[in-house]
Amino acid sequence: MADYTQLLKKHLKKAGCRFERQGRGDHEIWYSSITGIRFVIDQRIKSRHTANAVLRQAGLPKKF
């Protein structure tokens, strides 16, 4: 299975989202300037559906 985490982070940074802080365990809290909300990213995203769900929370269209 592919690991979508690095590709997802690169796409989020390009869209203007930013890392805010470390969350619990291996999670990170990010902020979307598009939607104005915070969302969580796991460090080991193995599913394209999960990666697309994170993009949707950030206010971006599907990519994976």
Image: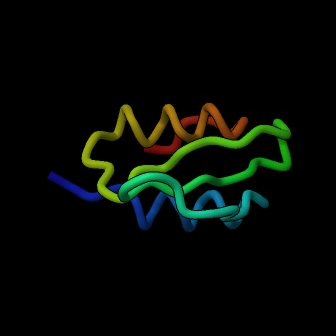
x 27%, y 58%: residue: 3
x 72%, y 63%: residue: 18
The part of the image, by quadrant, that contains residue 39 is: top right
In this rendering, is residue 9 above or below 38? Answer: below
Taking the image as shown, residue 64 lies to the left or right of residue 56, namely left
Q: Picture coordinates of residue 37 (x, y %)?
A: 77, 38
Q: Quadrant of the C terminus?
A: top left
- Looking at the rendered structure, the number of numbered marks drawn on it comes to 0
Taking the image as shown, residue 20 lies to the left or right of residue 3, namely right
Tell which residue pokes out farthest to the front in this image. Answer: 24
x 43%, y 42%: residue: 51
The part of the image, by quadrant, that contains residue 10 is: bottom right
Q: Picture coordinates of residue 60 (x, y %)?
A: 68, 39
Q: Picture coordinates of residue 27 (x, y %)?
A: 44, 54
Snapshot colouring:
rainbow
x 60%, y 53%: residue: 29
User: Which is nearer the eye, 58 or 25?
Assistant: 25
